[in-house]
Image (cartoon, grey):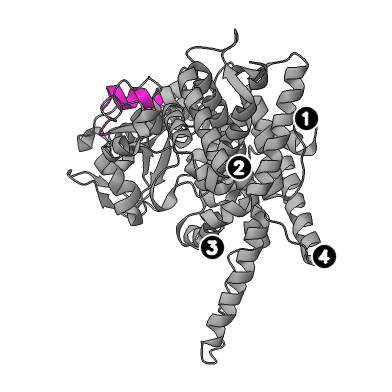
Amino acid sequence: MWDISGTWHSSAMAVQPEPCSWAFPMLVALASLLVCLAALYLRNKYAFWESRGVRGPRPTWLIGNMYPRLRPTHSMAEYDQLLYSRHGGKRYCGYYEFTIPCLMVGDPELLKHVMVKDFDHFTDRSFVRFNEPVMDHMLLGLKGSMWKAVRSVMTPTFSSGKVKQTLALVKVCANNLLTYCHKHVDMGSSVFEMKEVFGMFTMDTIASIAFGVNSDSLNNTNNEFSAAAARFFTPPPRWKRPILFLQFLWPQIAKYLCLNVIDRTPIHFFTKVVSDTMKYRLENDLRRNDFLQLLLDARVQEHSNDHTSAARNDGNTKKVNNQVLTDLVITAQCVLFYIAGYDTTATTLSFVSYCLALHPDVQQRCMQEIEGVLEKHGGDVSYDAIMEMTYLDMVFAETLRLYPPAPRVDRTVTKDYILPGTDLTLHRGQKVTIPIYSIHRDGDHYPNPERFDPERFSPENKARRPHSVYLPFGSGPRNCIGMRFALMEAKVAIVYLLQEFAFIPSKKTQVPLIIEQRSGLLKAQDGVWVRLAKRTSE
């Protein structure tokens, strides 16, 4: 038997190394290895465009070329201008959104391929997943076959005939706008922040047409719709911004962790409004000439088509009815109608009033056209009358050229694609950015581009330019589906106002406008201030 209680045992134990004597060097070595691997990974990532011979700005590690947007030192439009004019974006250039390589394309011929001719390679748009069912079912963010199905069902809803049906509701809101302006001018408050005023008008219009309710924002700024809008459009607090980056970079991780930057309260409010309205109409067999009714009618037609297909299926019992317009999808499109139509249309109207105020000769010509057309139509602001106002249309087109509410759009590569005229292959999942603001202010397309000149959009001048250099509503199958309605709504508002008021610069009118840096949309930093003067008092 060995004596294990002797001095050998104690001496053996005494020579064992201290745990910390080897653990710390191991941790340092492991950390160094991880840093080296991360550095190699990022170096490889940021060599993507250089290795393919594509021009672009030098990226900063981890944030790529996003620093001007994170700080921010530039608005989205100004940031794109840098890429477009300095780094080759006028044709195409590569840049990085964090570690993701993206391609900016500005060449008209290439844009025609990306947005129209070869659309089957670019059917999707990049869209942050918000882990909120209503938001994630909006047409704007749908992809692939689901987008195609919803778009095909919704397209007839925005035909000129269907848009015409909503005109009566728009005119009610425009008349309320006119009353509001008269009231304030009579009280001596003739200088307006036009984005705010037109925002109340578009709020009431969309509440009426998309949700079938009267929000009355022009008379009650504290109504539920205004409160929901304020909450929805309020930027997330700083502590939530890392969540937004996580949703952008690794959406699956954000979804798994149930992380979200969206305030769900306004979404739940809109969902309840749509649900209650649908239920009430179905139970009481009521109809209304609005967007919600058009979607409900489209669902009935879809259901009818499914039954017809089943009847022709010769007794085949396989499921035919894969309904596209579910309650969730209808609700999502009503919310999208609000999100996409409220702010952008109000912004466009504010810029139109600003441009007319600074160019009285253009305003006078608009007024003369409006008077002539309405006299021909018996004073009725009808759909046909609006369509006949060609100079007014030119004014809107030029305003949207100078101030497109969305300064850029994008497409996602859905099938590998060789860019025409190059040996550059774009791979599935890559993002292609179209810098609308920069293209619109390119002197090669529009001489003296900073000047406001509606004559650029006369039929003769339009015919001389490629279609792909004017993109306020996008282009191709994924263009803005609500374009007809948005233009009709905005023109009605201007026609109503110009009949009784003149737009005049005030001391608060900013020339030139300074663009808000923190917004992804094009907005005036200090508002758009214009004075309204009654024409009858002149």
Counting residues from the N terminus, which is met first, the one under dot 2 or under dot 4? 4
The mark lying in front, picked from 1 and 2, is 2
Q: Residue at x 27, y 51 (%)?
A: 417
Decide: is 291 above or below 502. Answer: below
Name the quadrant containing residue 343: top right
What residue is pinned by disc 4?
A: 284
What residue is pinned by disc 2?
A: 381
Amino acid type assigned to the residue bearing label 2 in the image: Val
Query: Toward the viewer: 193 or 14?
Result: 193
Q: Which mark is residue 333?
A: none
Q: Residues within 10 Å of mark 4 (few under 14, many from 20)?
A: few
Q: CA distance from mark 4 to mark 1?
A: 31 Å
Amino acid type assigned to the residue bearing label 4 in the image: Asn
Viewed as shown, does residue 442 lie left or right of 344? Answer: left
Where residue 466 appears, x then y in whole percent?
A: 28, 40
What residue is pinned by disc 3?
A: 153
Q: Helix, strand, or loop for circle 2?
A: loop
The span picked out in magenta is 79-91
Q: Residue at x 34, y 57 (%)?
A: 120
Counting residues from the N terminus, which is met first, the one under dot 3 or under dot 1? 3
Counting residues from the N terminus, which is met first, the one under dot 4 or under dot 3? 3
Asked if marks 2 and 4 touch (Cβ < 8 Å), the reply is: no
